[in-house]
Amino acid sequence: MTPISAAAPEARKTTKAAPALPGGYAGRLLRVDLTKGKCWAEPWGPYDMRETLGGAGLGAMILYRETATKGGKANVSWDHPDNRLVLATGPLAGLPVWGTGALTVVTIGAQTNGPTSTQANGFFGTNLKYSGYDAIVIQGQAKDWVYLYINDDVVEVRDARFLAGKDTWETQDALNATLGLSGHQLSVYSIGVAGEKLVRFAAIQGDYGHVASKNGCGAVMGKKKLKAVAIVRGTKGLKAADSRGVMQAADDIAYDLKTDPSAKSLYLWGTLPGVVNLSKLGALPIKNYTTNVPYDDLANWEAPKLREGFDHRGHQCNACGMHHCHMQVIRSGRHKGAVVDEPEYEGWSGAGWTIGATDQEGVSWLNTEVDRACVDVNEFGWVCGWVMECQERGWITKERLGFQLKWGDIEGAARLLGMITRREGLGDILAEGMKGAAERLGGPAKDAAIYTMQGSAPRGHDHRARWEEMLDTCTGSTGTLESGVPVHVAELGLPTRINPFNGEEVAMLVAGIRGRRHFEDSLGICIFTGRTRLENLCRALGAATGWNYTLGEGMRLGRRTAAILRAVRLRCGIGTDKERPSARYGSTPTDGPAKGQAVAEQWERMVDAWYAKVGYDRKTGKPLPKTLKDLGLDWLARDLWGKKA
Amino acid sequence: MSVLKIYPEKCTGCLRCELACSYMQTGEFQPAKSVIRVSPFEGHTSYAPYTCTQCAEGWCMTACPVGAITIGAVGAKDVLDDTCVGCKLCTIACPYGTMFYDPDTRKAFKCNLCGGAPACAEACPTAAITYEDVATADWLGDFARERTARVLVGVS
């Protein structure tokens, strides 16, 4: 049955004399064993709630406790029935704080075969909390396609054979029709055909346009034969310790988002301004990193222009006032009339600039096709752009691919997407992800591919001009950006400006913010509405739960979570030798704003500085005993270091 | 008098109004007990909130056999819990579907304009719900006529 690490503490059992639950929590975890077809509710108590919060914190602890093998020396692989798929909310989910429908997926991912924590929004978290659960923990593998149905206390593993072969939007349509529900009365998160076919960078998509995309979490769901999770908007109540306080904190967060320069453009335009802003830094990835000079007039890519080009309508997540998520209708061209999700910056980049596209309506359509097939749009962009470059240079012939794919060819890119999704022809190799495909092809083609040695591809930026994100992606334990984007760094005592091409300054910044993102991802709040001062988030959490919660405790929670994820990563066999970019990813830009800035020259020094600052051992990658003890993780210190701790 | 007005084109379907309303109604965040409800339209692309318009006819008051629905200080029809016997006649009589029945308390419940400071209007981040002074409580007829002329123009 479930392997449990020898030293990791068991979850404290709730007893009759247990103190009252903190506000903001439903108080139960929903356990699902797909092998046995059983579901049961597991109460969890105030101690564990404060120690792990929810989301990434809870998921990391569950992975550590429940996926170990060989007495804690190794870990189950992504495709093992004992791998856990944790779909977690947090204490703010379901409350009237902006963007609190969040879902955090924590599992052993299919790309790095190591841990991941990846987030989406919509109404999953809200519907789950109002059904009476804080998280779903899925283990086992079903024999044939099933979906999980949750309607308050009615929880069933149902036959999903009628959903097999459907894309994610079709799956939600079909479940709405089957269950007689519409709108946010039903939140559906599902995999597309890519997940069914175990494409290594398959994602989980829900509520028409929200994607938990990283590290192949969709392949994990596919391996478990779980097509979808469908949650009816529950009828239970959610108490906050101080409801008025929650509203006040929510208003303060909203004020920050509307007025602070670091968030105001997000409030107004979502992530659309990223295209123009990142291009000014040389961080817009263009044609598979072959250039940093935009090939199209950027005036056409300003945020208002991108939004003006479509008939659109707000499609916000729970309680959110950001002008961010939108549905839009394509006005003209081949896909006229198609309803699509407005691409995030990452969509304009992955389905646009990375593959040399200029047709905005086409990019918008392709981006939603990627969500429907359900792969990570970033990794798709890298794979597609790489194939385009390989064809241009003759490394992949027309005969090998089956057709000629030129830069900017949207319909061709969609054809490639279909081949990857169904694992047809060369698509079967490409479905192994950027690293897997590049290593299979080898030669000069391998050196043109963008990935980390851990096994996943970075997000849709040219990190050769954003060293902090390259460092974070390569050293992280989630297969993607782990510590995230620096916001309100003065709150953490960090300098507000650094030289972005000074490796040591970059390392100090990345190490300094380490923990903030883990904390945010444990709350059940969107990363964009979390872009407020931590003090505000702590106040919202305190009002919800009744705890006196400080910024220091939040960062400590985040750093504990990071350390636990690191321990799981090491148990999965991903050591420090894998903390490097691929040749192209770590190359030097030859043009554009970051021309000549050579990250490779400073790489080792930058990583050394990062290790020293975070208090991890440079050689083994383990968090040092003192670091762990300072975080109150004495048990983990004993696990990792034995008697030396 | 002041009434709640709805601007559907501004609604993004975030359902924050339901959370705020349920908190005022029950002391908890429990959208199932909200008296403002957001409905989806046009598949999953369009949303609009809807609640009691405090209509002049007062169908719920007329139907109530025990006189449990009265008009409060701010002009809102409100249910007197002590008098309500939970017969649900008001929920049948209301042509707008904005009278509700709570199986836990076994009483009818409805929008009472939060005593003059509606939480839904306060909570709405896009001003799709506003609390406005109007000449007549029955603004819905004008609303329907205006939208028919504007939105359905050319539709036969």
Image (cartoon, grey):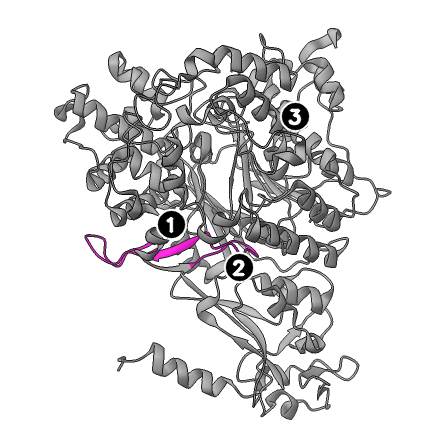
Report the residue marked by disc 1. A303
* Subunit ID for the residue under disc 3: A
Element type where label 3 sits in the image: helix
Report the residue marked by disc 2. B14
Camera-near label (2 vs 3) is 2
- The x, y position of residue A30, in whole percent, is 62, 43
Residue sitting at x 48%, y 16%? A579
- The x, y position of residue A555, in whole percent, is 68, 32
- Is A319 colored magenta in this rendering? yes
Image side of residue B149 versus residue A249, left or right: left
Question: Would you identify the image quadrant in which residue A151 lies?
Answer: bottom right
Image quarter (top left, top right, bottom left or bottom right) of the N terminus of chain A:
top right
Residue A638 visible in the shown view: no
Image quarter (top left, top right, bottom left or bottom right) of the C terminus of chain A:
top right
Cα distance between the residues tagged 1 and 2: 22 Å
Q: Which amino acid type is shown beneath numbered disc 3?
A: Arg
Cα distance between the residues tagged 2 and 3: 36 Å
Q: Which amino acid type is shown beneath numbered disc 2?
A: Cys
Q: Predominant secondary structure in magenta?
A: loop
In the figure, A305 relative to A488: above or below?
below
Cα distance between the residues tagged 1 and 3: 45 Å
What crowding class fits label 2: few (fewer than 14 Cα within 10 Å), some (14-19), or many (20 or more)?
A: many
Camera-near label (1 vs 2) is 1
Element type where label 2 sits in the image: loop
Q: Which amino acid type is shown beneath numbered disc 1?
A: Ala
Report the residue marked by disc 3. A65
Q: Earlier in the sequence, mark 1 or mark 3?
A: 3
Proximity of marks 2 and 3: CB atoms separated by less than 8 Å: no
- The x, y position of residue B121, in whole percent, is 60, 70
